[in-house]
Image: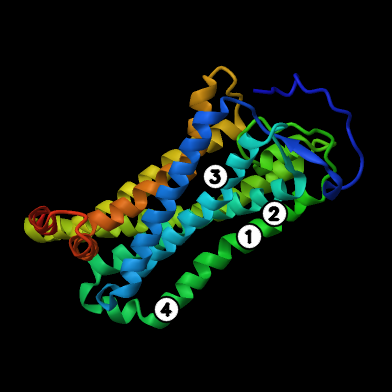
């Protein structure tokens, strides 16, 4: 592990495009490479399988399942932005990455993170409509409206973060040390030649734009769902809430991972064990990319039925066990 004090490099002049390299941490290589490779393949396989099953079965072409596919695509986007680059750094003798790739990774990871929250907010809205207006669900969530919502969820974080990130790209960098496994915007700002306090202020505005509207939507949706469920009979109440469980678990999981990352970026964490810091910094990408396809694949009955049929077809699971899981 290289701390900022352990590498003595001369400050350099010029724009961010002239930076030769950004240094990343060094730690035990061999086990990490295999773990990252395994996690990456598991993430890609699980999310691809879920998307493929939903795409191939017309019965699953419902708004909620389309949003699940969108979430899975974002998981693969985030995993691809993080894990291959991390493996390349670990395999490198110098543990360096080109500055241009570092800047690109900042954009990829930040848009993944904000995009994830946008998709989860959209899924919360979908659950609100499904539970509170079941008879009007298909008219409210029409194909036209669904396409507009998907376009909004994709473009909103890409454009909002690009506007903010343009400020960082104008900075001149003097430092070369990033004490993390990957590049993030605040670390680039810390390596700039000037303090640039306005970026921290604009960053707070960015957090507001990328968190508050989505949070309001989620809180509103579940407040309305709770209000409606209190009026239902216990059986109908349980059925309605059951459809929300995978979304709630995904939301809690991602929120926890994001809080870990925000705390590490904004506060001094040198007193925390290195291994724990590495795990917590990777949590917001790695864990959701594996747990979400499992939650929505096995936690949603209609999707689970098609997955188990596929397993029976290719004799991956015994028929009796698959049938038992289908009715569970």
Distance Cα–Cα, label 2 vs label 4:
28 Å
Of residue 25 and residue 235, the one placed in the foreground of this image is: 25
Category of crowding for the residue at label 2, using alpha-carbon neighbours closer than 10 angstroms: few (below 14), some (14–19), many (at least 20): some
| Dot 3 or dot 1, earlier in sequence | 3
Q: Which residue is mark 3?
A: 83
| Image quarter in which the N terminus is found | top right
| Dot 2 or dot 4, earlier in sequence | 4
In which quadrant of the rendered view does residue 325 lie?
A: bottom left
Residue 20 visible somewhere in the drawing: yes
Q: What x and y, as percent, mark residue 314?
A: 23, 62
SS class, disc 1: helix
Residue 145: which numbered mark, if any? 4
Locate residue 6 relative to residue 60 in the image: left or right: right
Category of crowding for the residue at label 4, using alpha-carbon neighbours closer than 10 angstroms: few (below 14), some (14–19), many (at least 20): few
Q: Which residue is mark 1?
A: 160
Mark 3 and mark 1 residues within 8 Å of each other at the beta carbon:
no
Q: Residue furthest front?
A: 315
Locate residue 278 relative to residue 220 in the image: left or right: right
């Amino acid at each position: 592990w290289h701390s900022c004090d352990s590498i003595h490099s001369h400050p350099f002049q010029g724009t961010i495009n002239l930076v030769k390299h950004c240094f990343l941490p060094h730690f035990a290589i061999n086990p990490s490479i295999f773990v990252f490779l395994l996690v990456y393949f598991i993430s890609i396989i699980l999310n691809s399988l879920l998307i493929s099953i939903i795409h191939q079965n017309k019965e699953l072409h419902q708004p909620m399942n389309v949003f699940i596919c969108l979430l899975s695509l974002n998981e693969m986007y985030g995993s691809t932005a993080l894990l291959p680059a991390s493996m390349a750094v670990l395999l490198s003798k110098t543990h360096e990455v080109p500055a241009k790739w570092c800047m690109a990774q900042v954009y990829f990871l930040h848009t993944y993170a904000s995009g994830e929250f946008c998709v989860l907010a959209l899924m919360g809205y979908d659950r609100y409509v499904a539970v509170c207006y079941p008879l009007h669900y298909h008219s409210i969530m029409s194909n036209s409206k669904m396409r507009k919502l998907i376009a909004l969820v994709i473009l909103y974080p890409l454009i909002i973060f690009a506007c903010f990130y343009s400020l960082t790209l104008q900075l001149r960098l003097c430092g070369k040390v990033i004490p993390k496994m990957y590049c993030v915007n605040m670390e680039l700002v810390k390596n700039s030649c000037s303090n640039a306090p306005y970026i921290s202020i604009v960053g707070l505005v960015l957090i507001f734009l990328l968190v508050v509207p989505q949070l309001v939507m989620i809180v509103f949706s579940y407040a309305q769902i709770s209000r409606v469920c209190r009026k239902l009979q216990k059986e109908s109440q349980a059925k309605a809430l059951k459809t929300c469980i995978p979304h709630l678990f995904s939301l809690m999981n991602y929120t926890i991972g994001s809080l870990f990352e925000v705390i590490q970026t904004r506060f001094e964490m040198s007193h925390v064990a290195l291994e724990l810091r590495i795990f917590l910094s990777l949590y917001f990408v790695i864990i959701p990319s594996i747990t979400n396809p499992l939650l929505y694949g096995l936690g949603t009955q209609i999707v689970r039925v098609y997955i188990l049929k596929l397993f029976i077809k290719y004799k991956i699971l015994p028929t009796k066990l698959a049938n038992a899981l289908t009715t569970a």
